[in-house]
């Protein structure tokens, strides 16, 4: 992979929050050998892990790292996940993962993911994960009512990040 091309594509994939002006870098991931299957491609289950890695990175970039949220007693379990495979990723290939908040109502959160080839920006995989906010007793939390600052931060990202 050409480093100049990677840098150019990385910059093109940076998201800007059109509400706050904040910038979010895409999550760069190199496919590892242990993630491949007998067909020499990334095993389908690993894309879900990659979604999680990019979600954790995204939340950290907007100041809502899992460690910060958990210290406040906020947990974010997964309610559902979907993944659509368009083109295989092979060992050692690099991908850019772009998470985007597409739904948030203060109790539930849905994040969309696009996995792009880092060289060509071709869509490899896309998917979504749905989450809710609960306390340590797994009781639902209304973020707007109980954690207004966190609510406002997440709400500002609903359908508001644009690449480029």
Image: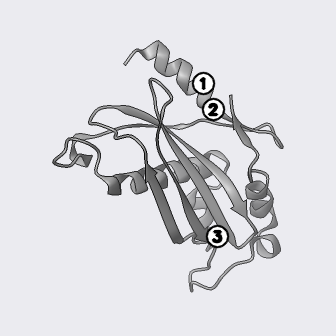
Residue 162 picture location, percent across and down: 71, 37
Residue drawn at point x = 55 percent, y = 58 percent: 128
Front-lying residue, 71 or 27? 27
Disc 2 residue crowd, few under 14, some 14–19, many 20+, Cα 10 Å: some
Q: 10 Å neighbourhood of mark 1: few (<14), some, or many (≥20)?
A: some
Residue carrying label 2 = 14
> Is label 1 in contact with label 2 (beta carbons under 8 Å)?
yes
Q: Position of residue 19 (x, y in %)?
A: 83, 43
Of the two numbered discs 1 and 3 on the same chain, state the one appearing first in sequence: 1
Up-down relation of residue 44 to residue 1 (above or below): below
Residue 45 % position (x, y): 34, 57
130 w.r.t. 26: above or below: below
Q: How is the image coloured?
A: one colour
Q: Position of residue 146 (x, y in %)?
A: 78, 75
* Alpha carbons under labels 1 and 2: distance apart: 5 Å
- Asked whether the residues under the numbered discs 2 and 3 touch, taking CB atoms below 8 Å apart as contact, a structural biologist would say no
Q: Is residue 122 above or below residue 65?
A: above
Is residue 96 toward the left or the right of residue 39 in the image?
right
Residue ID for mark 1: 11
Check whether the beta carbons of the residues at disc 1 and disc 3 lie within 8 A of each other.
no
**Residue at image x 53%, y 44%?**
114
Q: 111 or 152, which lies in front?
A: 111
In the image, farthest residue toward the front: 86
The Cα–Cα distance between marks 2 and 3, rounded to whole angstroms, is: 29 Å
Q: Residue at x 51, y 29 (%)?
A: 121
The mark tally for this picture is 3
> Which is nearer the N-term, disc 2 or disc 3?
2
Residue that numbered label 3 is attached to: 72
């Amino acid at each position: 992979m050409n480093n100049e091309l990677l840098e150019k594509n990385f910059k093109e994939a940076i998201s800007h929050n059109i509400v706050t002006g904040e910038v979010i870098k895409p999550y760069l991931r190199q496919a590892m050998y242990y993630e491949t299957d007998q067909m020499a491609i990334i095993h389908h289950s690993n894309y879900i892990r990659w979604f999680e890695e990019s979600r954790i990175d995204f939340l950290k970039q907007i100041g809502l790292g899992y460690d910060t949220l958990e210290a406040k007693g906020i947990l974010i379990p997964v309610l559902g996940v979907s993944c659509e495979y368009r083109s295989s990723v092979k060992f050692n290939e690099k991908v850019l993962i772009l998470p985007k908040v597409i739904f948030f109502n203060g109790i539930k959160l849905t994040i969309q993911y696009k996995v792009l080839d880092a060289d060509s920006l071709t869509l490899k995989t896309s998917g979504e994960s749905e989450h809710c906010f609960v306390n340590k007793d797994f009781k639902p939390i209304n973020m707007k009512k109980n954690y207004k600052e966190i609510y406002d931060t997440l709400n500002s990202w609903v359908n508001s990040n644009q690449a480029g």
